[in-house]
Image (cartoon, grey):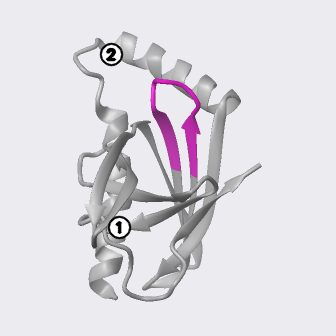
């Protein structure tokens, strides 16, 4: 369980990585693009939410907003419930996700890779169906436990 928790933490940290990538743009241009992405994410996006197990607390709440256009922009808010002296610890990552098609355990799947802003890793989500994404490890494998690692589409 501790290994899987570490994998989830690394995956969540990976989401933050994308926000730091400006692909050679100036700081001023990157800032302008970030505000545009934020506006788009707020007005024309799909949102997934879910609370997944945590080894050291009651859970980790994820809220993922993906922009509905070719930019593949995202914003991921991660809340570690009662993490610091009983208080929630919130982090946010923004950037561009990558769509990956991969065969895992003999089954073809579609995955979203969300790099972290700080470059420490990435979050990988498996597309289960039209309304569900599932957190998976860095090898694109689902948790061996039967615990719920799903994020559900919010309407």
Query: Can residue 129 be seen in this snapshot?
Result: yes
Is 98 placed above or below 29 here?
below
The residue at 35%/78% (across/down) is 5
Q: Residue at x 34, y 88 (%)?
A: 1
Q: How crowded is the residue under tag 1: few (<14 C-alpha within 10 Å), some, or many (20+)?
A: some
Q: Looking at the picture, how far across and down is residue 70, in whole percent?
A: 47, 24
Height in image: 66 above or below 9?
above
> Residue beneath label 2, please?
27
Q: Residue at x 37, y 35 (%)?
A: 19
For the stretch drawn in magenta, the main secondary structure is: strand
Range shown magenta? 64-76
Q: Position of residue 116 (x, y in %)?
A: 33, 47
Residue 70 inside the magenta-drawn segment: yes
Answer with mark 1 or mark 2, whichever residue precedes in sequence: 1
Position of residue 113 measured from the top left corner of the image (x, y, whole percent) = 35, 49
Of 126 and 115, nearer the camera is 126
Residue 125: percent from the left, percent from the top? 42, 58
Q: Which residue is drawn at 63% across and 59% down?
A: 49
Against 2, is 40 above or below?
Answer: above
Instruction: Evaluate whether residue 84 shows in this view.
Output: no
For label 2, the SS is helix
How far apart are labels 1 and 2 at the CA level?
Answer: 29 Å
Secondary structure beneath dot 1 equals: helix
- Residue 147 in the image: above or below residue 60: below
**Does the magenta run of residues contain 143?**
no
Locate residue 50 relative to residue 5 in the image: left or right.
Answer: right
Which residue, given by chain and number where applicable, does mark 1 sit on? 9
Q: Is the residue marked by circle 2 packed among few (<14), some (14-19), or many (20+) residues within 10 Å?
A: few
Are circles 1 and 2 on residues that touch, CB within 8 Å? no
């Amino acid at each position: 369980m501790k290994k899987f928790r570490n994998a989830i933490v690394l995956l969540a940290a990976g989401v933050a990585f994308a926000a730091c990538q400006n692909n050679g743009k100036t700081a001023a241009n990157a800032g302008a693009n970030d505000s545009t992405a934020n506006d788009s994410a707020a007005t024309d996006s799909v949102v997934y939410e879910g609370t997944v197990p945590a080894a050291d607390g009651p859970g980790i709440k994820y809220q993922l907003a993906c922009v509905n256009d070719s930019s593949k922009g995202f914003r991921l808010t991660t809340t570690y419930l009662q993490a610091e002296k009983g208080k929630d610890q919130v982090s946010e990552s923004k950037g561009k996700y990558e769509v990956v098609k991969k065969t895992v355990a003999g089954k073809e799947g579609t995955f979203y890779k969300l790099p972290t802003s700080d470059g420490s890793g990435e979050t990988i989500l498996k597309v289960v169906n039209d309304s569900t994404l599932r957190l998976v490890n860095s090898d694109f494998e689902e948790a061996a436990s039967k615990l719920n690692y799903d994020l559900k589409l919010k309407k």
